[in-house]
């Protein structure tokens, strides 16, 4: 009898420490990313990583609880990058900003971000969050080079400054997006 493809992938993950994503039937755990430490017909010892590329302990899974396995896809490749450069994500770069207590606080911060156009930010605009780099600004609006949650270049969008209600500058999620954006642009 031929070996199961699932066991073939588990074995390759174990022998080559190849990252895989495991989807489980149990929705409580859902999805795990990592590599197989050891396995048999019934159980899998799985080195799990956080979405920021840090080791997150060993998870013991039942093989019959595995719904499917992702391998050699975009998410797995992005996670390889995050694991390799996880220390960069966890180091917050220094940025000097000045906050003047005026009615134009949004405009002042947007103008400062134009001067720091390599700094990724997230903005709350009309009850939604958008991440990216501020590339241009006028007195009333600005251009944000939008970045997706896995570093995808989502193009330029013009927003009204008055619609901005919150700024997040280089938080952990944004540093992850920034790293993956640069990786996708091959500029790490």
Image (cartoon, rainbow, N blue to C red):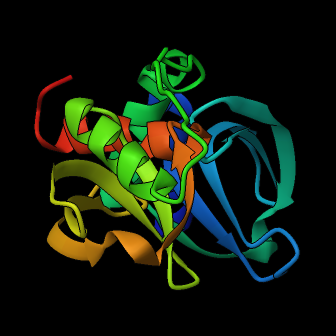
When asked about the image quadrant of residue 37, the answer is top right
Q: Is residue 171 above or below residue 65?
A: above
Q: Is residue 105 above or below residue 54?
A: below
When asked about the image quadrant of residue 156, the answer is bottom left
Q: Is residue 79 above or below residue 15?
A: below
Report the quarter where the C terminus lies: top left
When asked about the image quadrant of residue 65, the answer is bottom right
Residue at point 84%, 80% (across, down)? 26
Residue at point 60%, 22% (across, down)? 90
Q: Is residue 115 above or below residue 110?
A: above
**Residue 4 seen anywhere in this rendered image of the structure:** no
**Residue at the extreme front:** 102
Residue at point 13%, 27% (across, down)? 187
Q: Nearer the viewer, residue 125 or 154?
A: 125
Q: Nearer the viewer, residue 2 or 125?
A: 125
Q: Nearer the viewer, residue 48 or 93?
A: 93
Left or right position of 96 against 187: right
Q: Position of residue 116 (x, y in %)?
A: 27, 30
Q: Position of residue 96 (x, y in %)?
A: 46, 18
**Residue 66 seen anywhere in this rendered image of the structure:** yes
Left or right position of 169 against 158: right
Q: Position of residue 169 (x, y in %)?
A: 51, 40
Q: Position of residue 80 (x, y in %)?
A: 41, 36
Left or right position of 53 against 2: right
């Amino acid at each position: 009898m031929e070996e199961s493809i699932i066991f073939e992938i588990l074995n390759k993950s174990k022998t080559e420490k190849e990252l895989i994503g495991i989807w489980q039937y149990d929705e409580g755990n859902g999805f795990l990313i990592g590599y197989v430490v050891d396995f048999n017909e019934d159980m899998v010892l799985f080195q799990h990583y956080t979405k920021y590329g840090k080791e997150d302990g060993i998870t013991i899974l039942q093989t019959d609880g595995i719904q499917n396995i992702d391998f050699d896809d975009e998410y797995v490749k992005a996670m390889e990058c995050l694991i390799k450069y996880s220390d960069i994500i966890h180091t917050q770069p220094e940025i000097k900003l000045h906050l003047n207590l005026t009615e134009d606080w949004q405009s002042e911060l947007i103008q400062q971000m134009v001067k720091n156009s390599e700094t990724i930010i997230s903005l709350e605009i009309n009850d939604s969050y958008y991440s990216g780099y501020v590339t241009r600004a006028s007195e009333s609006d600005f251009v944000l080079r939008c970045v997706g949650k896995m570093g995808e270049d989502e193009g330029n969008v013009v927003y009204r400054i008055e619609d901005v209600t919150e700024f997040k500058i280089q938080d952990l999620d944004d540093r992850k997006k920034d790293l993956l954006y640069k990786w996708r642009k091959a500029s790490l």
